[in-house]
Every structure is written in structure tokens, then in C-alpha cells.
Image (cartoon, grey):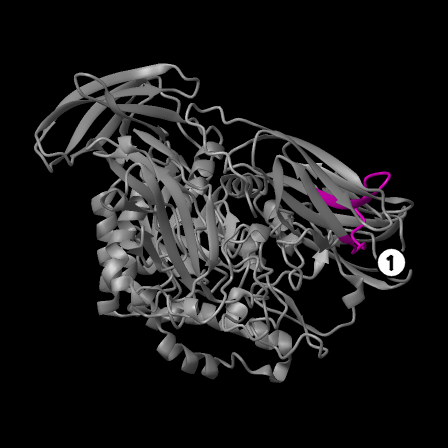
Amino acid sequence: MTRTSFNAGWAVRPKVSLFAEFDGPVIPPQPVTLPHDALIGLPRSADSVQGSHAGYSPDGTFEYSKTFEVPEDYRGKRVSLEFQGVYRDAMVFINGDFAGQRPFGYSIFTIRLDPFLKYGQKNTIRVDARVHQDSRWYSGAGIYRDTFLSVTELVHLAPNGVRVSTPDITAGRAVVDVATTVENEGLSTATVTVGTELYDGDGAVVAVGSAPVTLKAGGTAVVRQRLYITEPRLWGLDSPHLYSARTELRDELEVLQADTTTFGIRSLQLDPFNGLQINGETVKLRGACIHHDNGILGAATISRADERRVQLLKEAGFNSIRSAHNPVSQAMLDACDKHGMLVMDETFDVWTEGKSAFDYSLSFPEWWERDVEAMVAKDFNHPSAVLYSIGNEIPETGSGLGSGWGRQIAEKIRSLDSTRYTTNGINGFVSVIADAATMMKEAGAGDDSQGVNAMMSGAGEAMGRISSSPLVSERTAESHAAVDVAGINYGDGRYVMDRELFPNRIMVGTETFPDRIDVLWKLVEENPHVIGDYTWTGWDYLGEAGIGRVQYTDGTDGKPALGAPYPWLLAWCGDIDITGYRRPASYYRETVFGLRHEPYIAVQRPQNYAREHGMGPWTWTDCISSWSWSVAEGSPVRVEVYSDAEEVELLLNGSAVGRAPAGAAHRFRAHFELTYEPGELVAVGYINGVEQARTTLRTAAGDIGLTADADRTELVADHADLSYVTIEFRDARGNLATNIEHRITVTVEGAGVLQGLGSARPDTEEMFTEDSHTSFDGRLLAVVRPVAEGDITVHVSADGFEPVTVSLAASAPATAERRDEVTVVA
């Protein structure tokens, strides 16, 4: 049996009908290596039918094709192709004949190839995908996740056929239940043996077992083995120890198939008195909602990109992610297992009631069950996955018959996996949306007579009031009762009241406003039945353009609205921007969590000091941690200092600006008004009059140089690895010159290509697929993808600055089964 990457050797072009081929020339196919996003390199426009929801990206239909050799010895075997994600409405053809489809854009699905193959010849696979007003955020398009080709005997392990659970754990031993599904697609009865070896993280064998099984032709059987590991090392947030199970399917003469499954040993418990317990210890979920895109790479799910996101989110203080609002990638789950990050994996953003003109609601009634099965099969062996969310802000959750859909989904999940818990991200406002408009009008929300600030914040406040109303209590009771944990979107007013109304209810803030984390986290800590909080969002994303922006109302930012005008691209509401750089809200959150004790200085952009503006519920102040500004000395400046200290003193060039209270009693914020003077800005935190810690910002001065630094220089020449090269303008002392905006060019030579180049600027018209881009706040990010073994040289240049180079090296994969080596085209 072989399972190999099928990512190489593809081509893509805009899809045209067979008849259009006769009308004239069409765009020729362009070579690509998967994963690939067909939208990210296309021009955006203000009149895009996708609008601000998708960041003004275009729609389109795309045709992927690949021609590959099928050897004669594949005859008589089962040949299949696994797609880990195609957005959207995938139609698969082999040698021109229809082979299968998948409407949902986020499910893993497998297509049998052997009925269509021509052995000893070249064969062609074609995959059509389309995107058109079917998402509330930037979805990307095309085959944006990995593909794998599997060739097995007719007696073989089923896809995702090895499921490992640990139902019984003590200090001295753990029971490991290995359930292996075997299929016989041959024409005669077969007897085979399933052998299993368990290995610890150091590669030592810790348990062995085997069992015979006889299958009739066309039969399927589950072989269950209970193996025992003594002195088990548990998987947890701080010590994510992983084991592996090697499963061999053998007949009398040979090994028919071998498979390796990674798993962890950990226990889960849940109750309203101790909340969520992992290995017997209560864990409060410091959660980040994330979308699936990878910033300047678009929707392409290259494994290293997802792993880097997990690492940076954990470094920022999060211990859990919510995959808003679709099943997370296999690569993300692998990274969460490896680095100790918990996962709430979410099924759908819609059920039967659509939110976009052509979204998944059109396919949900027929396909939901298969898509739930795909998600659970993907998650089952991952210790990081602890919660399944059955939906997000589903309007049907406010009606009895609509709640029935939720009950079906939850019960389907329980039938497939009884080891984890279910939730549903219910927004009480959406659940009673037919009545909400009237209630908001009566409450005065949306009345702009008090100014833009009142108008923009009023919607969030009204949403909270409605979510806490008796109407929502009654309408959502059935939906909450269908799941194990009541997920609450923007309804923290329910946390305390539901402890009395529904004493057995366990709750989690599935989606919350970022500027209320201090209030929310206090509620989480004080209420054992509230197991955590998931902010919107932990990582900024493409689409829902400008929902988190500070909206200036002096005529330059358009009419006040939730969505920003073109050329806005980013939501601009993430703790971490799309390049992986932490924004001020991230350091504030870390302080509230009790994980940071150094003051953090955030300076509001002085050029906007006097501008009238509005702050929406997802908005953070327009600030960065910098004291390098292109404004005149003496210009007024507002400074925020985030600190858990009782008091903060601010010093400018050694002179006291003033002292202000901070800490929990003052929402962990100290505010200062001063005038700009280049030099050194220092914040000192005091507790009981004694200095706790200090932080310093210095103006970038003197000769400013161009710098480039790679997060990793030793790479693997496969389809999963990347190097992230941070490009910055710094002075000789290392101070970041955030006031420099300059166009930078990046070229890559040798065994790599430039996969993406861009900044976190939220309203750019520049493309991430070009080799030149303008810095933002003194920074730019280049992503390099290896294409073969060998050296890679990254050249970075900007007019007026000394160029710099970064040297990388790509080596062969360490595994026995090496991936295809092909030229990668971004």
C-alpha cells in the first residue's frame, strides 16, 4: 500500500464551457502546486459582487487538471484520491467521466479512481470549483488543502479506519482501545491479521497486539484491540506528549497495508461545579476564534503556515482555538496536538436558512450527515480536539422545529464519537432576529442623533440586552438542551442569570467582543459553569472588511457602516495581524489573563489625534507600540499603558509626564495626554509604591537600515514547509522605524519560490502575489516555499537602502516515502 502526496503537477485556469471553447482563445492553464488559492492572485474591485464580505475579491469558476501515469501493476488494486478541502461545489472527472462531487468546501472526501483508469497509460483528472456569493468572509477558491493518492489491495483498511481512544486511565496504566475497520472488496472470503504496535514519543515500543479477522467478499469488520501502557505520559497543554500506533494488515505471505496513527492519552470531564477538566485538572479556555485563511497566502493551507499560527497564538497566551465557522484543517489539528492547543471544531455557519445568496444552505439538507461524518473521522484521533460545535449563529435555533436540526447533528456526532462534548455558538439576537429589529428600535439602537460613537456601539449593547431577555431564554432553551455546553455569542449577560435559570447548564463564550475581555474573563474565573471565552478574533483575516476599524467620520472614510469601502481587505479585529505580528489588544489580553506583568505602551497614531471617529464593538483603539512618528515636535499624543500594577508612571526623556491608576480596578489601563518629543518613553508599574516592572520605547534615529530575518533557515523540500522572512526598517540600536513606508522588492533564487509577499495594511490595493510591496508600520513579510533540495537565496532591496540577503537550505524529507519533487508555482 502507498499513500503519497498528489500535490505536484497541477494546472489551473478559469473554467469555460465546452461551447465557449469554439468562440475564441481562452486563458491557458497555469502550472501550480497544491495547496493553492485561485482567488488570491486575482484583482479586486469596488464593484465586486462579493462585496466587503469577501474583501471585494472576485467570484469565479476554476478548472484544475493533472495528467499522471498509471502503471500496469495498479490493475486489480483499489486506487483512490483524497481531497482535504476544495472550495467549493467540487466536481471531479477522470479521463472526462464524472467520478464524484462535494458541495461543502471544508470536508475531506475521497474519490475512487480505479473504475475510470487506463492502466499503463497517462490519465487526466479534472476538478471544477466555484465561488459566488456563498460566504460571509473571504473563502478563497480551488483545491486549497492537500491531496493524497492511495493504492491498496482489495482487502484493506478503510479510510480513517484506525480509531484510537483511551477510555480508562490511572497513574500506573492506560487502556488504549484501537478499533480498526477492515474492508474486503475482493470476490472471495479472506482471513487477515491486524497487528498493532504502540510507540512512545521517543520511538520505544510500549505495547503490542494482534487479532485475526475473516471477511466475506464485500464484507466489512471492526477489529478491536485493548492494549495497555504502563506509566503513561499524559497529553496536556504544558506537556503535549504523543504516542503513535502502527497498524499492519497481514495475510499469510505479506504485509498488505501499514498505517501510522498519532494519538494522545488524556481524560476529559465536564460538570457545572468544576467546569472542563483535562486529566483531572480544571482548565479555563483562553480561546481564539480563527478563520481558515493564512493571510498573504490566501486560503492555501500549507502545513507550516497553520503550525506557525498555532505557535504564535499560544505564545500570545491562548490555549484553545475555535475553527470559525467550518471544520479545521488536518494540518491545524496536527499542530495543535504537537504544541498543546485545544480545539473547538465547528461544523457549519448555515443550516437550512441561508446567510448568502448561494451558500451551503442549498446543499445542507442532503449533505449535512456526510459532512459531519467527515469532520468526526478527521478529529477522532487528535487529543487536541475536545469540543464539536454544531453551528454558528444559526437562525433556526430560535424555533422548536429548527432546533430539531441541531438535535440531529448532536446525536449524529455522539453516535460517531462519545468521547468529546458538543456545543453550538448561539447568538440570542440571531435566534429571535424577526423580533430583534423591533426591540432594537424600541431601545434606540441605531439612532445616530448622539453621534457615530453612540450609533456604532449601540448595536453591540442592544445585542447583549436582547440576548439576556426572557424571549431569548424561552426560544433558545431547546437548542441549548440539545448539546453538552451552551455556546453563547455576545451574550455574557446570561452567564450569571443562567446559573439560576438553568442550574445544570454549562456555558462557554463562543464569540465575544475583544474590548470586554477584562469583564468577560472575570466572569469566567468567578463562575465554574462558564468554561472559557473565545474572542473575535485571535488572528486577523481576509474579508468582513473593516468590521474592527476605527471609523473616522471627517468624510474620508465613507458613510458609517459595518463594512468598510474599497480598498479595505482585512477585518482588522484580530489580536494578531495577518503577518503574525501581535497587535496591542494581544498584550492587553495577556495582561488580563495574568500572564504578563510588564507594562505595555500603546501610542494612538498622533496624525489622527483630532479626528472625529467611531468605535464599533470589534474595534480596538488606533494605536501601535512605537515612539517613531512623522509628526512635528509638540504634536499632541494619547498614550495607553496596559498593566496589572496598581499605578503607572510615564516618563519622557527622563521627565515625569504623570502617574495614573491601572490594574483590575481601572480595567488594566492607564491613560496619558502629552506632546510628541523624539527620544525615550518609559512606563513604570508600581505595586504598593514599589516598582514592579518597566517598559521602554525609543525613537528610531540616525541611519535606518533594511533588515531581514527568517524564522527557519533549514527547510524540508516537500509541499508542507515554508520559511517566513520578516523584513523591517531598523536603526543601529535595533529600534523599529514604524514611520517608514517604502516599496520593497524580494526575489528568490535557487531551490525555492516566493509564495507570498505583503504587509498587514488593512486597506491596500497591492497584491500578495507580486514581488514588490510597500511596508506598513515599518514591516513586511515574505514567505518562501522550497521546491527541491538545495540552497535558496532571498534578496531584499529598497531604493535608498543597502540590500540584504537571507540564505536558506532545503533538504530531502526524512520519511521513507518521499514526496514528488516538482517546480512549485505560487
Membership of 617 in magenta stretch: no
Location of residue 174 in the rendering, given as x and y in whole percent from the top left corner: 29, 23
Q: Is residue 354 above or below residue 338?
A: below
User: Magenta residues: mostly which secondary structure?
Assistant: loop
Quarter of the figure with residue 594: top right
**Quarter holding residue 131:** bottom left
Q: Which residue is drawn at 33% across and 40% down?
A: 121
The residue carrying mark 1 is: 676
**What number of labels is visible?**
1
In percent of width and height, residue 621 lies at: 67, 61
Nearest to the observer: residue 65 or residue 694: 65
Magenta span includes 732: yes
Q: Which amino acid does label 1 sit on?
A: Tyr
* The N terminus sits in image quarter: top left
Q: What stretch is highlighted in magenta?
A: 726-743
Q: Is residue 4 above or below residue 90?
A: above
State the image coordinates of residue 642 (x, y, percent, origin top left): 68, 50
Task: Say if residue 529 shows up in the picture.
Answer: no
Estimate the x, y position of residue 276 in percent, counting from the top left: 37, 42
Residue depicted at x 42% and y 69%: 22
Q: Which of 753 and 569 is in front in this view?
A: 753
Q: In which quarter of the image is residue 750?
A: top right
Q: Residue at x 23, y 46 (%)?
A: 414
Lateral position of residue 712 relative to residue 414, left or right: right
- Would residue 571 be found to the left or right of residue 242 on screen? right
Mark 1 residue crowding within 10 angstroms, few (<14) / some (14–19) / many (20+): some
Determine whether the residue tagged by mark 1 lies in a helix, strand or loop: loop
For residue 254, say whether it is visible.
yes
